[in-house]
Image (spheres, rainbow, N blue to C red):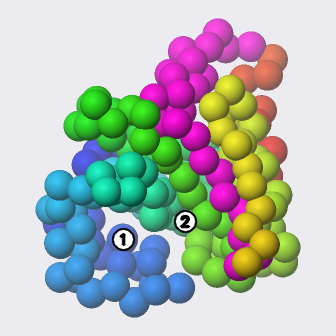
Amino acid sequence: MIEQAQQKHIPFVTRRLSPFKHVTEDTIIHIFGSSSEVVFVNPEKEVVCRIHHDIKKRENHVAWLLPANENRFDLYLVMAKTFVEVSHRFPQHDDFTTWARFKDGKGCISILTRNRMAKQITGEWHSLFPNSTQVKWRWWDNSWIISARHGDLVSDVVDYLNRPKGAEHDSALYSV
């Protein structure tokens, strides 16, 4: 079951972050309680998604979507719930840009076994949000950015989740 992150989820969130970042329990408690952070989890799968809502920059940053090597469908469902919650909490900010960064050997991609995955993973996520997202390469740090207007992204999520089930059911989610 997907739910808003709570203190009882700190042990598995810490475990998911530990391969590439040391975050203290106090920091996670602060993040979970912050009005600018939206964090949802699937405790059964130990999936966590965190979005930082930044009013000054007019953006939502997907800071965590872990673990990167989890089943794409499980990741997608937690992320989708988090996107929708951002719209519910901040409906006046659906024009903000929501974005995520992928860089080979860094962050969530560092736990994957194959090299040069950032471009591929960014493209795979783009295929799940075809009507709203753009993908760009940042030459100065050799990373890939996927971004969209938040309201359009949520529309893509709702369309995907409400589509008729058929032969192509979830095919993009299982392409990895």
Image position of 64 (left or right of 169):
left
Q: Is residue 74 magenta?
A: no
Report the front residue among 60 and 48: 60
Identified at 62% across, 14% down, the residue is 163
Farthest top residue?
164
Badge 2 vs badge 1, beta-carbon distance below 8 Å: no
- Amino acid type, label 1: Val
Span shown in magenta: 141-166
Identified at 38% across, 43% down, the residue is 82
Q: Under tag 1, what secondary structure?
A: helix
Report the front residue among 3 and 139: 139
Q: Is residue 150 magenta?
A: yes
Q: Is residue 74 above or below residue 165?
A: below
Q: Which mark is residue 26?
A: none
Residue that carries the numbered disc 1 in the rendered image? 13
Q: How many marks?
A: 2
Residue 56: name its quadrant.
bottom left
Q: Which mark is residue 67?
A: 2
Picture coordinates of residue 34, whole percent (x, y): 17, 61
Picture coordinates of residue 70, whole percent (x, y): 61, 59
Q: Under tag 2, what secondary structure?
A: loop
- Amino acid type, label 2: Pro
